[in-house]
């Protein structure tokens, strides 16, 4: 496994991380534990979750799975999504942060969180209030590093500026929706992260499984997959003729070089210098092994240029 610095921090994270939004939903505790065990065996030390993933069940499954192995993993969780109907049961206020961290620590059965992230921007709370609360958690030893998710470039810039001018803890990373088919963050967020050395943690790197090649044009989605049984919004978003045209070209590119599509999807993201870890979900140890294998394929600048030409041709 390859390890990279998390932005401008000293924390070393595995280039491929484990996303766990399936834990507690599509996966029960026992198969989740097997996936976590396989991740550790593969050298994957970065496990990402959130309190809203099955209302803390994902965190609980992780806590059970890493019992006795806590020092071998880095646990990243997120807060800010709605955890109840009350007005203070969501967002990034001091009130909610202080309650949310205690609940996550309890669910994870740990006394510290390696990376604590604001899941969504909160337009109702001043960023200084959020950062001061997070800084207090770092000073208390309950949190080691802080980050954000789904922030636009201007929001990340405001947070960094506030941290610097007010001498507060600074976000080490940002989680954007980023993959071969979803590249709007390249306009502003990625250049910002490059300039300010902020780590990028792409989520949905496989476009809900579409970029693995498991979905085929004109065929029903395989049983047990995210889009089986119609898939609703996911199906209408990803299973389009334009996307299948692009997938055909990308699969040919990968096959000509002796690699499966899943490796191309992840290695392309890892070719971006500010990407610290690619957060890829897995429901079986075999899927996790396929994700980790991508670390071994280092795309050249010529490769990435050809991929860009392929994608332009598919539009």
Image (cartoon, rainbow, N blue to C red):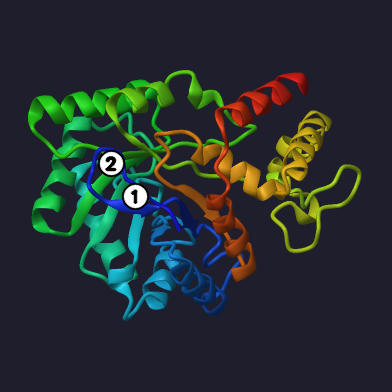
Image quadrant where residue 1 sits? bottom left
Image coordinates for residue 226, horizontal then vertical, percent: 69, 54
Left or right: where does residue 301 sit relative to residue 137? right
State left or right for residue 251 relative to residue 302.
Answer: right
* Coordinates of residue 41 in the picture (x, y in percent): 46, 72
Mark 2 closeness class: few <14, some 14–19, many ≥20 residues within 10 Å:
many
Does 274 appear above or below 76? above
Look at the image and tell me in which quarter the C terminus lies.
top right
Label 2 near label 1: C-beta < 8 Å? yes
Residue 216 visible (yes or no) = yes
Disc ID at residue 79: 1
Query: What is the x, y in percent for residue 56?
Result: 41, 64
14 or 232: nearer the viewer? 14
Q: Is residue 277 above or below residue 161?
A: below
Q: Nearer the viewer, residue 225 or 282?
A: 282
Residue at the image position 32 percent from the left and 69 percent from the top:
72
Give the left or right position of residue 151, taking residue 147 as reference.
right
Give how far across and how far down residue 27 sits, in percent.
58, 69
Visible residue check, residue 205: no
Q: Secondary structure at mark 1?
A: strand
Residue at mark 1 to residue at mark 2: CA–CA distance: 8 Å
Residue lying farthest to the right in this orientation:
218
* Label drawn at residue 92: 2
* Tag 2 secondary structure: loop
Q: Earlier in the sequence, mark 1 or mark 2?
A: 1
| Pointer 1 local density, CA inside 10 Å: few below 14, some 14–19, many at least 20 | many
């Amino acid at each position: 496994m390859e390890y990279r610095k998390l932005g401008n921090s000293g924390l070393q994270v595995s280039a491929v991380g484990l996303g766990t939004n399936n834990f507690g939903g599509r996966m029960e505790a026992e198969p989740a534990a097997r996936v976590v065990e396989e991740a550790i065996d593969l050298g994957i030390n970065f496990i990402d979750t959130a309190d809203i993933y099955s209302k803390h069940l994902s965190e609980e499954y992780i806590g059970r799975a890493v019992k006795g192995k806590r020092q071998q993993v880095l646990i990243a969780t997120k807060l800010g999504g709605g955890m109840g109907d009350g007005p203070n049961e969501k967002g990034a206020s001091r009130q909610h942060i202080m309650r949310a961290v205690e609940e996550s620590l309890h669910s994870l059965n740990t006394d510290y969180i390696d990376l604590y992230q604001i899941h969504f921007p909160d337009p109702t709370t001043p960023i200084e209030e959020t950062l001061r609360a997070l800084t207090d958690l770092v000073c208390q030893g309950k949190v080691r590093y802080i980050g954000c998710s789904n922030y636009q470039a201007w929001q990340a810039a405001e947070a960094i500026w506030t941290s610097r001018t007010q001498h507060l803890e600074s976000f080490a990373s940002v989680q954007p929706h980023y993959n071969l088919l979803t590249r709007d963050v390249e306009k502003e967020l990625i250049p910002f992260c490059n300039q300010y050395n902020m780590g990028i943690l792409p989520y949905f790197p496989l476009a809900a499984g579409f970029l693995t090649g498991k979905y085929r044009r004109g065929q029903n989605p395989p049983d047990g997959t995210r889009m089986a049984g119609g898939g609703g919004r996911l199906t209408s978003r990803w299973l389009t003729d334009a996307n299948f045209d692009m997938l055909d070209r990308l699969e040919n590119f990968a096959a000509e070089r002796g690699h499966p599509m899943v490796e191309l999807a992840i290695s392309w993201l890892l070719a971006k210098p500010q990407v610290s870890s690619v957060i890829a979900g897995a429901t079986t140890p075999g899927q996790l092994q396929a994700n980790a294998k991508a670390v071994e394929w280092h795309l050249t600048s010529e490769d990435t240029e050809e991929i860009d030409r392929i994608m332009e041709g598919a539009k």
